Image (cartoon, rainbow, N blue to C red):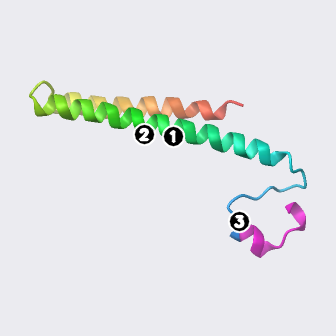
Amino acid sequence: MGGLGSDAAIEAADVVIMDDDPEKLATAIRIARKTLRIVKQNIIFALAVKGIILILGAIGLSNMWEAVFADVGVSVIAILNSIRALKD
């Protein structure tokens, strides 16, 4: 589609390949799969840590400060994990 496509088609599309090289579609799919894998890792890790802290808090082994530090720590680890998507 690239430079030959109409403006309406480009605006309606989810993904636009800006030149006429269909091999870039494989690259786009590879990047999308890697991104989805990292997103799933971040979500599972965050929910697991929050669940553990919730359970520990419910039985009296964790306090508010530990929950705050766990939340901030999960955020930092998720950001660092997401930076892996920048490679390649």
Picture coordinates of residue 31 (x, y %)? Answer: 68, 41
Answer with the quarter of the image where residue 23 lies.
top right
Label 3 neighbour load within 10 Å: few <14, some 14-19, many 20+: few
Q: Is residue 38 magenta-colored?
A: no
Q: Which residues are magenta?
A: 1-11
Q: Which kind of residue does numbered mark 2 sit on? A: Ile
Please tell me which residue is depicted at 85% across the width and 69% down the height of the picture. Answer: 5
Q: Any mark on residue 13, and which?
A: 3
Q: Which kind of residue does numbered mark 3 sit on? A: Ala
Which badge, 1 or 3, is on the more N-terminal residue? Answer: 3
Q: Secondary structure at mark 2?
A: helix
CB under 8 Å between callouts 1 and 3? no
Q: Any mark on residue 43, and which?
A: 2
Residue 40 shown left or right of residue 69 in the figure: right
Q: Which kind of residue does numbered mark 1 sit on? A: Val
Q: Secondary structure at mark 3?
A: loop
Which badge, 2 or 3, is on the more N-terminal residue? Answer: 3
